[in-house]
């Protein structure tokens, strides 16, 4: 059977997506279909049979909602199939959302192989993927992922390799470089995935895409991060922006594990409408960022200073 590692060689880099020819788009579509098929037919028993490195100091944390509960197992299978396995994978579900929703059998089966399904009282939307795990396991390395992506087999391995070089930094597989314009933060649409900050360089200007694989060392985030009222008031729909601002407040830079990343595969044939797409299309991220910088003006000063290194 064709593996995800084999298919990775046919993927384009993310910053090439706007320049794809018809043939390249067809190849990308075919690769996505094959990856989804591979994960769908992947027998969970191989997760125990294969001898892979396992790091019990690492917890992978993610969340989902009822509309995606039927295919979140594809993302989780790809994370159980990593070259370096985490100690556990936790899927956080909001109690209110799942009162009358049956958990699919293909998802429950994965609990035998390292998945834990946990229910939480507060529905903090995408913030659930870091919030509850950081509170429950403060001494562990936390890695966040999204529920609608099939991940490369070396995704976690890349994060841990860079973490060994920068143990006190946030490490991401995918990051956007925050563009500055006339002394302020430019529109989110202008933040580039492949900017001027290369891999292996700590920077406050890089915002980690928490769903593409982001590693947080223990105790790296300030206590302000867990203020639920401020999360709800300032950035409920934009967890990436909230974590970016909080990390700057805590004096924690971000390091990219790779300068350019290849396009990730969606676990659905036609991707559903996500908060991320709505935030970009409706410029909601720009309003959230404006609110955050108004509330935390010292963050803008740090961004301007950091940006001088790359001017």
Image: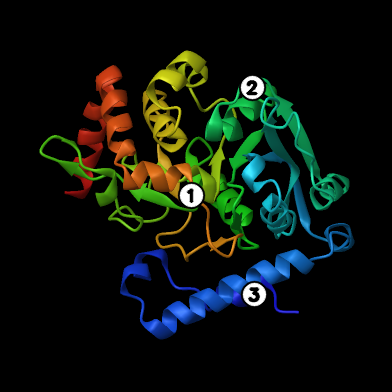
Spatial CA span between label 2 and label 3: 38 Å
In front: label 2 or label 3: 3
Residue 273 in view of the camera: yes
> Could you say which quadrant of the image residue 269 lies in?
bottom right
Query: x, y percentage for residue 305?
Result: 21, 34
Q: Nearer the viewer, residue 260 or 77?
A: 77
Q: Which residue is mark 3?
A: 34
In the drawing, does residue 264 fall left or right of residue 187? right
**Rendered image: mark on residue 273:** 1
Residue 227 in view of the camera: no
Q: Secondary structure at mark 3?
A: helix
- Residue found at x 36% / y 81%: 21
Query: x, y percentage for residue 296?
Result: 30, 20
Task: Please tell me how crowded label 2 is: few (under 14), some (14-19), or many (20+) other residues with Cα within 10 Å.
Answer: few
Vertical relation: 258 (above or below) 294: below
Query: x, y percentage for residue 83?
Result: 70, 60
Vertical relation: 129 (above or below) 123: below
In front: label 1 or label 3: 1
- Residue found at x 68% / y 50%: 72
N-term mark: 1 or 2: 2
Q: Which residue is mark 2?
A: 135
In the drawing, does residue 179 fall left or right of residue 160? left
Q: Nearer the viewer, residue 276 or 177?
A: 276
Counting labels gives 3
Spatial CA span between label 1 and label 3: 22 Å
The reply to whether callout 2 and callout 3 are in contact (CB within 8 Å) is no
N-term mark: 2 or 3: 3
């Amino acid at each position: 059977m064709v593996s995800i590692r084999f298919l990775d060689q046919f993927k384009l880099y993310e910053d090439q997506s706007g320049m794809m020819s018809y043939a390249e788009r067809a190849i990308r579509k075919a690769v996505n279909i094959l990856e989804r098929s591979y994960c769908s037919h992947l027998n969970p028993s191989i997760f125990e049979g294969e001898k892979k490195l396992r790091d019990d100091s690492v917890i992978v944390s993610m969340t989902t909602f009822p509309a995606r509960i039927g295919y979140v197992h594809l993302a989780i299978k790809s994370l159980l199939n990593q070259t370096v396995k985490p100690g556990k994978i936790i899927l956080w579900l909001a109690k209110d959302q799942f009162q009358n929703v049956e958990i699919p059998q293909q998802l429950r089966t994965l609990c035998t192989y390292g998945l834990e399904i946990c229910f939480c009282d507060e529905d903090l939307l995408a913030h659930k993927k870091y919030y509850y795990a950081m509170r429950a396991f403060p001494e562990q390395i936390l890695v966040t992922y999204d529920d609608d992506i099939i991940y490369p087999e070396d995704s976690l391995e890349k994060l841990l390799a860079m973490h060994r070089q920068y143990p006190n930094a946030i490490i991401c597989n995918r990051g956007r470089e925050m563009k500055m314009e006339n002394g302020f933060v430019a529109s989110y649409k202008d933040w580039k995935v492949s900017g001027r900050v290369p891999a292996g360089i700590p920077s406050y200007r890089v915002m980690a895409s928490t769903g593409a694989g982001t590693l947080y060392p223990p105790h790296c985030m300030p206590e302000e991060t867990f203020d639920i009222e401020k999360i709800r008031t300032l950035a409920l729909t934009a967890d990436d922006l909230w974590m970016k601002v909080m990390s700057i407040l805590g004096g924690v830079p971000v390091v990219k594990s790779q300068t350019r990343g290849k396009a990730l595969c969606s676990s659905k044939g036609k991707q559903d409408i996500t908060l991320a797409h709505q935030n970009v299309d409706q410029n909601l991220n720009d309003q959230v960022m404006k609110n955050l910088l108004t509330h935390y003006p010292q963050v803008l000063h740090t961004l301007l200073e950091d940006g001088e290194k790359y001017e």
